[in-house]
Amino acid sequence: MSEHSELLGLAREAGLEAAELVRRLRPAGRVDVVATKSSPTDAVTEIDRASERLIRERILTARPDDGFVGEEGEDVAGSSGVEWVVDPIDGTVNFVYGLPAYAVSIAARTDAAEHAPSIGYVVNIATGAEYGAVAGGGAWRWHGDERETLHGPPATPLSQLLVATGFAYDAPTRERQAEAIARLLPRIRDIRRIGSAALDLVAVAAGELDAYVEQGLKPWDLAAGGLIAAEAGLIVGGLDGPAGERLTMVARPDIWAEYSELVRACGL
């Protein structure tokens, strides 16, 4: 088994176990918020923390020399050159309210200095849908043990794009983003705000959305889903370079130039 296959297998094993833990621990109704991060609307629950602890323990027990970067806990420095980037529940607000779009997202970088994921795994906790990718090896959705290769959406003109987006948690930034999206909206088919960046990214890879744009993504939001989108044949980039916190865009190569210019013109 290649190193990438081994890493992806470990990510899938830990991700499925964490997803089951989250489903088991989630009470009926709304989930209590125990803390906030960037703003009062940026929620953390005890179940987020439990999910991350489980993933960290499973990965570092199997590979004790690896590094680990998680959204909810302290980073672990490694010596192996492999670094894991984990979001234990991407879409925490959906999780709190019981909306069925929240995911475990796990990526691994085999050259941590390059910051480019080598494998990515995303599972929708609420539905069980699983997605994976290996750098240079394609992207797929699992159906049991079978893999369906992902190729992104069909060719679609700019005016007919269904575009996913998201918004920051602080009010002034959210207001600016809303103004930019209002300028974008008349130029495309419509906007979707699902509430999980990882699920947005894999939905474009699966052809369920046509494109994506969002500001403010952290590494754990982007790493796994971004690799899956790229390996499905899409361009994943920013305004003038790689995708990142300033801006992340995803679109087919044949519409990338036109789409990225429109996003820029709208002020995102």
Image (tube, rainbow, N blue to C red):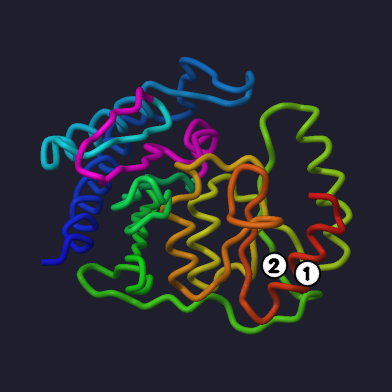
Stretch in magenta: 73-99
Q: Which residue is denoted by mark 1 in the rendering?
A: 189
What amino acid type is highlighted by mark number 2?
Leu
Q: Image point 47% across, 29% down: which residue?
A: 29
Q: Which residue is denoted by mark 2 in the rendering?
A: 162
Image position of 220 (left or right of 55): right
- At numbered mark 1, what does the secondary structure look like: helix, strand or loop? loop
- Above/below status of 36 relative to 47: above
Between 124 and 198, the one nearer to me in the picture: 198
Q: Image point 15% across, 66% down: which residue?
A: 2
The quarter of the picture where residue 42 lies is top right
- Quarter of the figure that contains the N terminus: bottom left
> Are there few (<14), some (14-19), or many (20+) residues within 10 Å of tag 2?
some
- At numbered mark 2, what does the secondary structure look like: helix, strand or loop? strand
Between 233 and 111, the one nearer to me in the picture: 111
Q: Image point 59% across, 54% down: which residue?
A: 243
